[in-house]
Amino acid sequence: MSVNGLVTACAQQWENLTQGAPAAAALSAHGNRFVWQPLGEGEAAHAPIPSITGMASVPLPGLDAPLGVLSVLTMSSGPPGPEQCAFLTAVARWTAEHLELSSAPRPPDLTWWEQEPSVSHEQQALKATKAGSWEWEIRTGEVNWDEAGLPVVGIGPDCPPRRIESWMSVVHPEDLPRVLAETEEVIRSHSLYDAEYRLCRPDGTYGWVQVRGRVVLDRGGEPARMVGTVRDTTQTRATQDSVGRALRYMSDGFFALDADWRITFVNVEAERLLGVSREALGRVLWDVVPGSVLPRLETRFRRAAGEGTPTGFDLRWPTDERWYHMRLVPMPDGLMVYGADITEQRMRREERVTAERAAAEQAARITELTSALAKAVTSQEVVSATADRVLPLFGAYALNVLVPEGQRLRVAGSVGYPQEALDLIDDVPLTGRYPVPEVISTQNPLFIGSVDEFLARYPSLADLLSLIQDQAWAFLPLIASGRLVGVCVIAFDRPHRFTDEEKVLLTAVSGLLSQAIERAPVRHGAHPRPGAAARPAAPRTALRPRGRHRRPLPAGDRRPRGRRRLVRRHPAVLRPSGPGDRRRDGPRPGRGCHHGTAAHCRAHPGIPRPGSRRAPDPPQ
């Protein structure tokens, strides 16, 4: 039997156990299984340490039968948990492997001084797990360490004397006051000792250790000594510190609360949101959070903790007016809170919804525009119908359509422009340095977003800008049936940045407008003057008499070709063609004169000229 952490004399009661003994070690060896057995009343009274509550034993696996049993004395009120059982099983397996290696025959060429000294396998297991045991005589201050515990605390085996002062001398100066206070409290209250702090290594570095122990009382009930274990947690603490640093400085807010609503952790972003600092650790959340934030949080936090299910919600934070998604995760001992800034996501979502709504409105406007253009007769009606439906869609205020006539430009229709501006741009030559001739020449749309950009391209047009309130322009070529029929100018009363979607839509509008302008007759000077009453449009036959209402000749008509041409040109006047023909000279009653000049109309007094207000309907 090999003993570690106990005086050998105290372990003699477990040294010679028979196979049928009721002890945990015997039961474990016989059944080849893990066994935990609480100490009976008699055993507890004679236990080497009064706080011992039971013994846990696990077999050392061998080829045919267990090589032995690894037993540990427990100080908890119940059996070891699954993690502790797994740990003991792993130590037992490691110990059995090394026992088999140590029992193998050594090479014959090794002399006794070349062989390694016998070392306790239990000590090797404790060294491998970087754990050890200790015992402190409170009255004398003497501290006894096992061989595995000395390297953990960084005390050499030849460092006399082994006293509590030597142990405290290697504790980190920042942790020493806390360690002393916790130790005094444990001795006074006879409670369990559990602390984690930093120790200074012989090489000058610092490592973390976790120390656990319990106070042992003498027969008078006074603290006599403390016994316990020490474990190296440097690697575990380093991992925890790296995670803690990541949580501390991550972009999302994060803080943790215990069951009493005390702040146990708060990162930098959460400090900013809550308006607290690291000094708030350990304080109740409701005592340190500003009142402007509290009403929006407390109800939801308490509900999530009461229901025990994770929940999330969006909240506009009152201190910075930004949107955050709060995620509440209840834990067995408290609540964890995450706060992610979603302001940009909400803005993009709102922009997408706005764009979809605008697209639907644009589609409805285009459909309405198509219907309105189909009903428009004159060019001014086409321009008015387009302006009513396009200008509000883009936030523009004026629309003008210019058509080329020879080498000059004429205004086919306009909405929103003053008459003074129309007089300047009507009947201007196509040559010159200004936008419309450039668009006619290139047949590409031109978008100008500000006055500065306009003047930089066309400095000679500064006088024109003084008459209008234009701040941005879209110049769109009107192309129908493969030829240019005009240019549409859409004006804005403020600077405007044209997006790609707007440019595409304006190009589509210009296509509809081109077809309508091609069909509609253009009356020069038809743009309405301010304050003038609207003048009804003349019939199409008055404007375009030729070729639109040709009267077909009767079947079998053998009149000369010149006479047929005369009839086609003058459908309102009939000539006698032969005997018995009911036709008569002069215009038919109720029909308009076929002449187009005042001189000819004198031949038919009382008959209105074509295009006048008294002109009747053309022949069908």
Image (cartoon, helix red, strand yellow):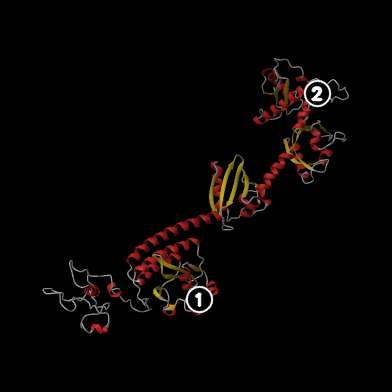
The x and y percentages for residue 468 are 47, 76
Q: Which residue is depicted at the point 70% across and 44% down?
A: 241
Residue 238 located left or right of residue 138: left
Query: Is there CB contact under 8 Å for labels 1 and 2?
Result: no
First reached walking from the N terminus: tag 1 or tag 2: 2
The x and y percentages for residue 447 are 50, 68
Q: CA distance from mark 1 to mark 2?
A: 111 Å
Circle 2 crowding by C-alpha within 10 Å: few under 14, some 14–19, many from 20 = few
Query: Between 184 and 536, which is closer to the camera in this rendering?
Result: 536
The image shows a total of numbered marks equal to 2
Per the image, label 1 sits on a secondary structure element best described as loop
**Residue labelled with disc 1:** 433
Q: What's the amino acid at mark 2?
A: Thr
Query: Between 45 and 288, which is closer to the camera in this rendering?
Result: 288
Query: Between 401 and 144, which is closer to the camera in this rendering?
Result: 401
Q: Is residue 466 above or below residue 347?
A: below
Q: What's the amino acid at mark 1?
A: Arg
Per the image, label 2 sits on a secondary structure element best described as helix
The x and y percentages for residue 404 are 41, 74
Residue 40 lies in quadrant: top right
Query: Between 225 and 297, which is closer to the camera in this rendering?
Result: 297
The x and y percentages for residue 188 are 75, 37
**Residue labelled with disc 2:** 8
Residue 416 lies in quadrant: bottom left
Asked if one can make out residue 12 in the rendered structure from this viewpoint, the answer is: yes
